[in-house]
Amino acid sequence: MVMAITGLCLVLFVTFHCLMNGVALFWPSGYNAICEFLGANWYALIASAGLAALFVLHIIYALWLTIQNRKARGNDRYEVKSVPPGVEWSSQNMLVLGFVVLAFLALHLIQFWAKMQLAEILHFEHIHQGVEVPPAAGTLFIQIAFAQIWTPIVYIVALAALWFHLNHGFWSMFQSAGWNGQTWLPRLKKISFWWTTIVVALFIAQAVVFTVRAHTCDFDKQMAEYKEWKSGEYALDTDTENVGEPWSKAACNKPCENACENACENACTQADCAQCGNCAGCAEGCDKCPGCAEGCDKCPNCCKNGPKAVCDTPCGRQAGCPNAK
């Protein structure tokens, strides 16, 4: 019963984790917001401690039940080696599969939890390529992890083991709880198969997409986008479908035309958008958008001598600006 209850909680956690990773695919800034929400706050720490306790209980009882079975069997092994009909391969290898999943969990904790929640608790930041990566920068840690060529390989192998472990464990936990009638047990096996298959397939798809992104997108660009989001240049635009995207993408780039397009897209901030009607003035000419007509040296958002937070934005490094770094 302990194995069944802890197993059910872990299945629900794996499902939640899969859905959370899906946010990183379609809304990176939203994923970073979730990472901040689930940082070193008291409720997140309590949840992490509870989750760790579930894992420890599940592992201890798995070892204890295995030892009990070995004692009951005695020193003599079975002479008949054939597998009885209806006995799944995974049911005979749940402990081994569990150890594979446990090894993968340790790697996953090193790549993410140790650099995020633990780092926030101990007040340190991970250094990558000489740059400090904030603990809540979830998308950056995904970038770092999946830039390693071995990461997707290890993840896919571990996810295959997870599929076998969950597929058997899902329905057997109901059987352990007494829900093992001839009508419902076959149904639970089918539910287990499809639930596990969908979750693991989504995990594998996420690993593939994260790997492709990590090898096609530069770390510095990801860091610049994260800094833009942290500085408040990301905003909710309820009038467009680009909810949560940067102003430069959501509002500024649509009205801008021809030569003004790049200037507005790189120079326009939330404050500028309010002044010139979401950069609608760019369509009429750069002179309608503050600073564009005179050039980037007159634009406060492209000024080399301006505030450091401003100059560090991609606009401050715009190739066409006279004061570009």
Image (cartoon, rainbow, N blue to C red):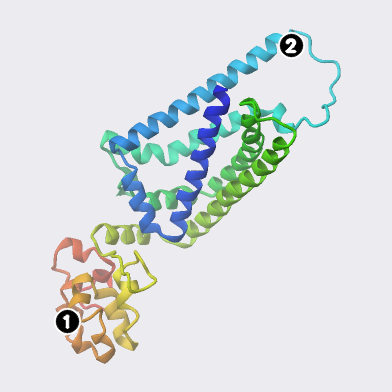
Q: Nearer the viewer, residue 107 or 175?
A: 175
- The picture quadrant where one finds residue 65 is top right
SS state under label 2: helix
Q: Nearer the viewer, residue 193 or 116?
A: 193
Amino acid type of the residue tagged 2 in the rendering? Arg
- The picture quadrant where one finds residue 291 is bottom left
Using the image, determine if residue 207 lies above or below residue 126: below
Q: Residues within 10 Å of mark 1 (few under 14, many from 20)?
A: many
SS state under label 1: loop
Q: Residue at x 49, y 28 (%)?
A: 55
Q: Quadrant of the C terminus?
A: bottom left
Q: CA distance from mark 1 to mark 2?
A: 83 Å
Give x and y (percent) for residue 202.
57, 51
Give x and y (percent) for residue 287.
19, 89
Apparent side of residue 190 relative to residue 60 in the rendered image (left or right): right
Using the image, determine if residue 309 lies above or below residue 139: below
Using the image, determine if residue 282 lies above or below residue 102: below
Q: Earlier in the sequence, mark 1 or mark 2?
A: 2
Q: Nearer the viewer, residue 150 or 107?
A: 107
Apparent side of residue 129 relative to residue 158 in the rendered image (left or right): left
Amino acid type of the residue tagged 1 in the rendering? Pro
Marking on residue 204: none
* 1 and 2 marks in contact (CB < 8 Å): no
Marking on residue 73: 2
User: Is residue 112 among what the camera can see?
Assistant: yes
Give x and y (percent) for residue 134.
30, 47
Q: Which residue is mark 1?
A: 290
Give x and y (percent) for residue 217.
44, 62
Kindly give the residue lying farthest to the bottom in the view shown.
Answer: 284
Q: Residue at x 24, y 75 (%)?
A: 267
